[in-house]
Image: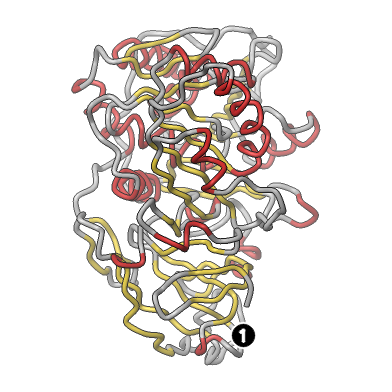
Amino acid sequence: MQAGTTTIIGPASRPCAAGERTGGPPGVRPDLVEFHIVDAGTTAPLSRGADGILRYGNLSPALTELLDLQVHAFSNREAVVEVGGGRLTYRELWHSASRVAGGLQEHGIGYGDRVAVHMPPGVRWVQAFLGALLSGAVPVLVHHGLPGELADRVIADSDADFVLGAPDRGCGATRSDNRWVADLPDGAAFIDDGAALNDLGLLCYTSGAGANGVPTGVELTNENLLSAIRSMVAALDLPTDGLRNLVLQPLAYASGCVDQLLPTFAVGGTVVLAHEMGGVAEAIATEGVDTLATNTRILGGLLPELAASRAAGLCTERVIRISTAGHRADTVETGDPGPAGLGEVFPSARQWSVWGATETSGIGLALGPTAGPAADADGAVLGFPFGGTELALCGPLAASGHGELLCRGPNVTRRYWNDPQRTADRFTGSWFHTGDHVSIGADGLVRRGA
């Protein structure tokens, strides 16, 4: 994304119709102003639906169908590598995941049921996640670092029917007295192919919307997921020649799973997973990593050690693509690694930054390597909208480009899980209230602070 490929047509005041804000009082909303910004770099077809949302017109019917096509196209390529652990080709991964799905089916799990995935990232995590998808169930992503009581609360809130856990926690049905076992379910290979675009595809939890930091479930449909994948592949210009993506973002977050793991699979690339700093350096040295996906917090901890490793002889020139994720709840922190620091450690890499929320499938705004001076800013720059994301501002200064940021698009959730009141509070029609106060410039660039 760059200023030259994004043009602003102009803010156009569009008061909300009476009662349009779901659950809100009747009346107009003269403080909501839409900013019509066109991503001229988008090559995929987008058309506006009856609800006003821009949508991709040629998506696969479901996420599993897209992945199935890639498995057949790239069957012998490595799909996932765990540094210090296992590695699987696309054929091996798909077969093992389909056996997990068959095992889940033998436990009575099927279409629409919820399966919690609660384990550290690795080959087993990917097998469990895909196995839940192939069974027809809805994966519920539970971060392995959550305190036990909070993780149990998330699993209970999701009304999960089955838990796929680490070996020390085990796997088992939540409504059965049967003993949990260490191994993933294993049965006759099974692939459910009945999902549709509007069906719930994934349940992610975010602390940004919950009261007192209690995680809240965000429903992401197949259309949300496929749209985010399409947008990320285009925005990062991901090739199909076998990229190797070292994903350091948590797979239990939308930024790791939806925006990195799935787009990498969508282009037949290899997802490389590392647990410790030593694993990161080893992956760069031995796994042919050419893409790095991370966030500013992780980068802040890694860069000094990677710089020292580079000075000691670690070759980092093969890394040609770095994607840094930002979250709507993130604040600007002094010392966050900027483009200059990254450039010293990875001199061959082009840099992207992507900003979003769980409610927007982790995406929404981006800055690309050709953004110019904007990329050298102090952390206040968030980026330009991309991939069908549209923006509005809310507040008394909205017409002048200052206010609370609202987003809508094919990647934006329709609602929170089992929480109609929070849904009513955070949505005006199809517009999601991010809670972030920003400014939108004449060039369409979004910055923090009103």
Residue 109 higher or lower than 37, as above or below: above
Question: In percent of the image, x 65 and y 10: which residue is there?
Answer: 167
Residue 362 higher or lower than 434, as above or below: above
Mark 1 highlights which residue? 25
116 or 404: nearer the eye? 404
Q: What is the crowding at mark 1: few (fewer than 14 residues within 10 Å), some, or many (at least 20)?
A: few
Residue 306 higher or lower than 54, as above or below: above
Question: In percent of the image, x 29 and y 13: which residue is there?
Answer: 91
Q: Amino acid at mark 1?
A: Pro
Pinpoint residue 97: horizontal percent, then vertical percent.
40, 17
Pinpoint residue 189: horizontal percent, then vertical percent.
34, 12
Instruction: Name the secondary structure under disc 1.
Output: loop
Pinpoint residue 106: horizontal percent, then vertical percent.
46, 14
Residue 157 higher or lower than 100, as above or below: below
* Image quadrant containing the C terminus: bottom right
* Image quadrant containing the N terminus: bottom left
156 or 209: nearer the eye? 209
Relative to 210, 434 lies left or right: left
Relative to 283, 120 lies left or right: right
Pinpoint residue 291: horizontal percent, then vertical percent.
41, 31
419 or 5: nearer the eye? 5
Q: How many marks?
A: 1
